[in-house]
Amino acid sequence: MHYIFRYHPLVRKDLSTINTTIKTRIKNSIERRLMVDPIKYGDPLRKTLKGYRKLRVGDYRIVYKIEGKYIYILGIQHRKEIYKKAELRI
């Protein structure tokens, strides 16, 4: 299945704080894993982020939601920060 990606407006700000090497790894993970099979590669989240999934890229996490052919990326941040900030973006 071909997916269409939609990004939360603050994802651009998230990426501006990440170094170039990690950005490249994140981009490759999105292209090679999320575009191919977002259910297989992502783990479901619980509690307040129920319905969302996470993709682990080193110490960074991509939080996203699958709705039909759309994948909504809520945030891309370090693992210490992403879950608190993702809750505020819902």
Image (cartoon, rainbow, N blue to C red):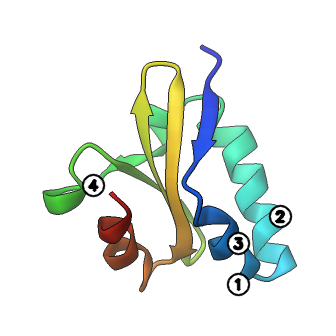
- Mark nearest the camera among 3 and 4 is 3
The residue sitting at the front extreme is 9
In this view, 6 is above or below 4: below
Q: Given contact means CB atoms under 8 Å apart, are the residues at marks 3 and 4 in contact?
A: no
Tell me the kind of residue under disc 4.
Leu
Q: Where residue 27 sits in the image (x, y, percent)?
A: 76, 55
What SS does tag 4 mark? loop
Q: Name the residue under label 3.
A: 15
Q: Distance between the residues labelled 4 and 2?
A: 25 Å
Q: Name the residue under label 1.
A: 17
Tell me the kind of residue under disc 1.
Thr
Label 1 Cα neighbours within 10 Å, binned few <14 / some 14-19 / many ≥20: few
What SS does tag 2 mark? helix
**Rendered image quadrant of residue 15:** bottom right
Tell me the kind of residue under disc 2.
Thr
Q: Distance between the residues labelled 3 and 4?
A: 22 Å
Q: How far apart are marks 2 and 3 (CA)?
A: 11 Å
Q: How far apart are marks 2 and 1 (CA)?
A: 13 Å
Q: Mark 2 points at which residue?
A: 24
**Rendered image quadrant of residue 14:** bottom right
Q: Given contact means CB atoms under 8 Å apart, are the residues at marks 1 and 3 in contact?
A: yes
